Image (cartoon, rainbow, N blue to C red):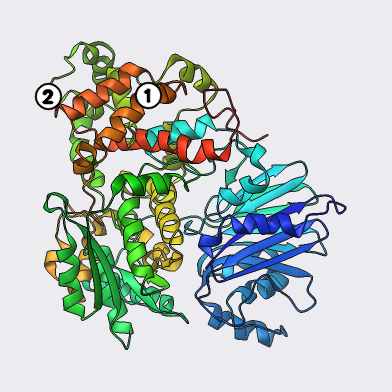
Amino acid sequence: MCGIAGIVSSATDDDIELSTIRRMCNAIVHRGPDDEGIFVKSGAGLGMRRLSIIDLAGGHQPVFNEDRSIWIVYNGEIYNFPELRPQLERQGHRFYTHTDTEVIVHLYEEMGAECVQKLRGMFAFALYDERRRKLLVARDRLGKKPLHYAVMNDRLFFGSEMKSILTVAPELATVNYEGLLQYMYFGYIPDPLTSFVPIQKLPPGHLLEYERGELRIRPYWDLPRYGTHQPASEEECLEELEYRLAEAVRIRLISDVPLGALLSGGTDSSTVVALMSRASSKPVKTFSIGFKALDFNESHYARIVADRFGTDHHELVLEPNVVETVEALTSSLEEPFGDSSMLPTYYVSCLARQHVTVALSGDGGDELFAGYDRYEIHRRRQIFERVPAWIWRMYRKHVFALLPRTMLGRKLSYNVSLPWRERYVDSISFVPAFERDLPLFSDEFRATLRDFSSPEQLMYNYFEKAQADDPVSKMLYTDTKTYMVADILTKVDRMSMATSLEVRVPILDHLFVEWVTGLPPEWKLRGRKQKYILRKLAERIGVPKEAIYRPKQGFALPLVHWIRHELKDLITTTLLEPRTLQRGYFRREGIQQLLDEHFRGRRNHSGRLWRLLMLELWHRNYLERLGAPDSSQLTYASGRLT
């Protein structure tokens, strides 16, 4: 596991200095504290910071081929490299390391860019072919590892984090208001946009090729068609599910350093721990946290699972300094990030890193097996589709605005009046519902946004692209492409790598994902039973029912409590300060309404207030310290690359 960075120029006489690449690497030391490697030659510079996991002594990067004409820096793990290596050796390739990295180099010699089709794992790599003066950059199929890039002055910059790019090209720090609008809607910025106009995210399952000044980006993988194979029986489905997930877990236990698991005590992480325990000759090290506030400690579920499987369990019940943690994290995040569960993810990563270097997690189960409440809620609300669409249109146009704002069920009535796609996107968006009551955005910000497409359209595009016939599968596809990548996996990557911990995600093994995608939706959401077949598997392999059928909380977070207590002063002062309002995003009246309704107990706006706080703290703790141009007040910037 590493962090990578570099620059490739289209001009051969462009001298890229070793010190420049070193500065890029120094910005991401936390991703790889064990080693540094740099290659600079002929208008190309590749760098990496290494967290040593496999071949501790011999795995120094960059890695090269036999004649040193191909060089690679790489972040991730290729789990099938033990099978690929002997195949390549039979084809005449000579290896000088025992790492998985070198497999990619020799695969490229055989297959070119299509080498990614052979890789099973999580990865982001940059490979430079000196003879062709070509850079190949790839990101894994599900987006477990990040990759950012920008083109400026005939140079392509890339990095695991934008910090590397901005360290040597601070002029690229032009705020992207289209990206910020997406954040305000969803709490994250979906690919390919970032918080800065010139910098883009390489989408999951995509390749980037930069050759003699020409940039090409293309997909190499997508989720297959949903609902293509119907198991003959529940027993057959469970047997196949167990075999495939057990194998995905087993191959992720390869490590030359201590390994464990993050255990929340829910179905997903408990199932992973159960399968780890079966495959391991020693007790699995497990890690869980809880909070003292308001008896919000859910760690006893994790303890039940740990006892059941005899793990070496480590538990920490926290009463953290929330303000201090929030200030510290927002000073390192390159984009505003609205998922408050980043705090418990960070805390549990800190705990795990005291004992292990690698940890498995249960992420991805909700997007594969319909684990979020909103899928079941959507099904229940389908009954409203019996009302003719024209009646609902008349209701929204002529009736809704006349209803008292305090009327019980008013927002729900608007949501259920929408067609199913619009209804779903409306339910996961922060902005539209609030804007219908009292506009939140300033006139200046609205003017800036006129040339941008609505964030909702991004979601509709994914609905259209999904190879599925039923709404639930289309929702799963959309969430996998957006929320899972830009929120869940981004959170896990940033918080774990901040502590130099590698996290592996067996449920998102791409072969397992392809098989689960092919299951019809009734195996995932059956009536009101979410994650139906995964929960049946958990029962089958011995996970206690208390953990399987507990209320969904993941690594629980007492956000409501914190906002009403520890964070109250920070929120109320920060959001209404002239410094905040002068940025030009929001109307004071809209912010004041949110605060009044929340702190008077009329409505729970915890999630909304958290998102707004994260946006402003990103401006103060990251953007202003970076010295970004025009970071103090609103100025127009296009969100599209030309």
**Can residue 76 be spotted in the picture?**
yes
Residue at point 40%, 53% (across, down): 491
Q: Quadrant of the C terminus?
A: top right
Residue type at the position of mark 2 = Leu
Return the x and y of residue 54 as percentages of the image width and height. 53, 79
Measured Cα–Cα span from mark 2 to mark 1: 32 Å
Q: Position of residue 16 (x, y in %)?
A: 78, 54
- Tell me the residue at 50%/35% (across/down): 179
Can residue 474 be seen here? The reply is no
Q: Is residue 411 left or right of residue 107?
A: left
Q: Which mark is residue 266?
A: none
Q: Horizontally, is 113 left or right of 277 in the view?
A: right
Near mark 2 (Cα within 10 A), the count class, few <14, some 14-19 or many ≥20, is few
> In the rendered view, would you say 563 is above or below 90?
above
Quadrant for residue 128, please give it.
bottom right
Instruction: Work out whether residue 232 or residue 79 is closer to the camera in this orientation and state it.
Output: 79
Q: Is residue 48 left or right of residue 375?
A: right
**In this rendering, is residue 185 above or below 581?**
below
| Residue located beneath label 2 in the image | 408
N-term mark: 2 or 1: 2
Residue 37 screen position, x and y as percent:
66, 68
Indicate whether 282 appears above or below 51: below
Q: Position of residue 547 (x, y in %)?
A: 16, 65
Give above or below for 239 relative to 452: below
Q: Mark 1: which amino acid?
A: Glu
Tell me the residue that label 1 is attached to.
577
Quadrant in which residue 637 is drawn: top right
Between 552 and 572, which is closer to the camera in this rendering?
Answer: 572
Q: Secondary structure at mark 2?
A: loop
Give neighbour class at mark 1: few <14, some 14-19, many 20+ (Cα, 10 Å).
Answer: few
Q: Nearer the viewer, residue 57 or 266?
A: 57
Instruction: Classify residue 175 as left or right of residue 435.
Output: right
